[in-house]
Image (cartoon, coloured by chain):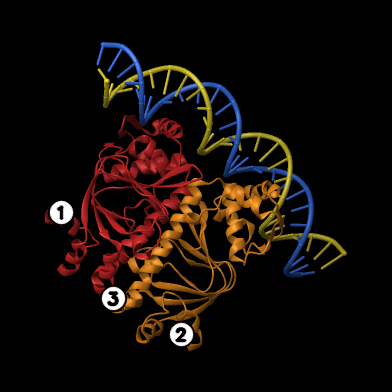
Chain colours: A red, B orange, C blue, D yellow
Amino acid sequence: MPESLHPDVRALPLFSQIAEDSFQALMRGAYVQNFPPHVELIVEGETSDFLHILLSGTVELFARWNRRETTMALVRPVSTFILAATVKDAPYLMSARTVDKCRIAMIPSQDVREVFDQDAVFARAVVTELAQCYRAVIRAQKDLKLRSSLERLANFLLRRQRGCGGAAEFELGMEKRKLAHLLGMTPENLSRAFRALAPYGVRVEGERIAIDDQPALVRFAKPDPLIDAPDA
Amino acid sequence: MPESLHPDVRALPLFSQIAEDSFQALMRGAYVQNFPPHVELIVEGETSDFLHILLSGTVELFARWNRRETTMALVRPVSTFILAATVKDAPYLMSARTVDKCRIAMIPSQDVREVFDQDAVFARAVVTELAQCYRAVIRAQKDLKLRSSLERLANFLLRRQRGCGGAAEFELGMEKRKLAHLLGMTPENLSRAFRALAPYGVRVEGERIAIDDQPALVRFAKPDPLIDAPDA
DNA sequence: CAGATCGCTTGACATTTGTCAATCGTGCCT
DNA sequence: AGGCACGATTGACAAATGTCAAGCGATCTG
């Protein structure tokens, strides 16, 4: 793996505190690969030979069953994915595909487990990361089971707005069809849901969203830190 | 904490391999408490001062939002819960209540984090346990997003059957209303769903279930190891 | 530039799921 | 025994969500 990529990776919470030789041990076996859009990187059920680190581009984690498919999450750089399968040395539960052009570093799972056993600081980082992932999924599950699709969309917009700096106008950052599957609904329904939020001051122009009456939307969405906080 | 309880706790995957003095360090600050049924042990949003270990009885993990409530999981002895909040030292995302009379051991979160930093074997066990929890929630999420309520019930029955030893007749092991909330539906709907499975040989008598035509139910449910396996 | 492709939108309709109210049955208490 | 409380069930209805088909509009491509 080229030295030039180290800084970005090194800055990840997973690696930022670990000893230099641990980091080198991880990077030694790693390599970087470029992928075109819409490539299936991982097929659920396969064994997890690598920890993946997304350096640029967007990756979609999704799952299939009985000819149905749903989006589980969108991964943005710079971050890792499929850590749980790596540490458990178990088959992937989700598939992954590139959304656009992606640059991805891959660290052999074996190396991750070895460094984990030798470097207590890395071990702590892995646990923190895993706990964070776990809590994120719990939040998603609460979102799914406790809210209607309209409420999910409203809260998603508020989260996204905050993530984009809090301005009244911001970008969705993904295709509407992906958003629909992420929120657990059909594209048709998402379209209708956007219109249903118009009375709360939500305007849509392509991937650009404007929230004219933020307080009204908040009153409707009732965001909750235990579901919507970036981390809590 | 009484010595007599150690063996059960010691046998947990989380503790079975760790050094004796690590184990003693964890048990030193621990204490055991008995709770009557329907007691709220944990309120989501509070800080997590203890790692809980269920010694006997059943605990329900649930979540609330906007006057709605849903069951997230049922915990059976002997196992731990709320590990993620403990290691992250973050607020609980779920509430917990006793279903029946429960005996629960509580280890100060601070001790867990300290032993984690000193005992690499324990660290590895925590990571494995967390990864397992994570994967369980991912499975639950796939179940929710990819299946109808009828399919969820059918697959639940097959999982439960296997968990009970595989006999054609077995116990549900929980109230139907709890099952309904666990599967993400209303009790009324669960009732109708049971009737809808009658053509596949599902008979219901109180909490007792009989599956007369297992192959037919399997054909309908299409169980998938990546969703329904106890561990994979 | 024309045609094709693709994603988004819209309307009509079907299915699923939830809500409300009433009833039934069981276990428990007095 | 009577009656009460509670969970399960059922039916009628309403709301939410999905499906299918058509059309629109932007972008890509030959």
Residue A54 drawn at (x, y percent) = 25, 51
Quarter occupied by residue A206: top left
Residue D24 drawn at (x, y percent) = 38, 18
Q: Give yes or no for contact between labels 3 and 2 (Cβ–Cβ under 8 Å).
A: no
Residue A177 drawn at (x, y percent) = 39, 36
Query: Residue visible at 65% across and 53% down?
Result: B215
Query: Residue visible at 62% across and 67% down?
Result: B165
Q: CA distance from mark 1 to mark 3?
A: 30 Å
Q: Which residue is mark 2?
A: B1
> Are both tags, 3 and 2, on one chain?
yes
Chain letter of mark 1 equals: A
Query: Residue visible at 52% across and 54% down?
Result: B70
Quarter occupied by residue A136: bottom left
Q: Which residue is mark 3?
A: B117
**Element at label 2:** loop
**Residue at the bottom extreme, as displayed:** B3
Residue type highlighted by circle 3: Asp
Q: Which residue is mark 1?
A: A5
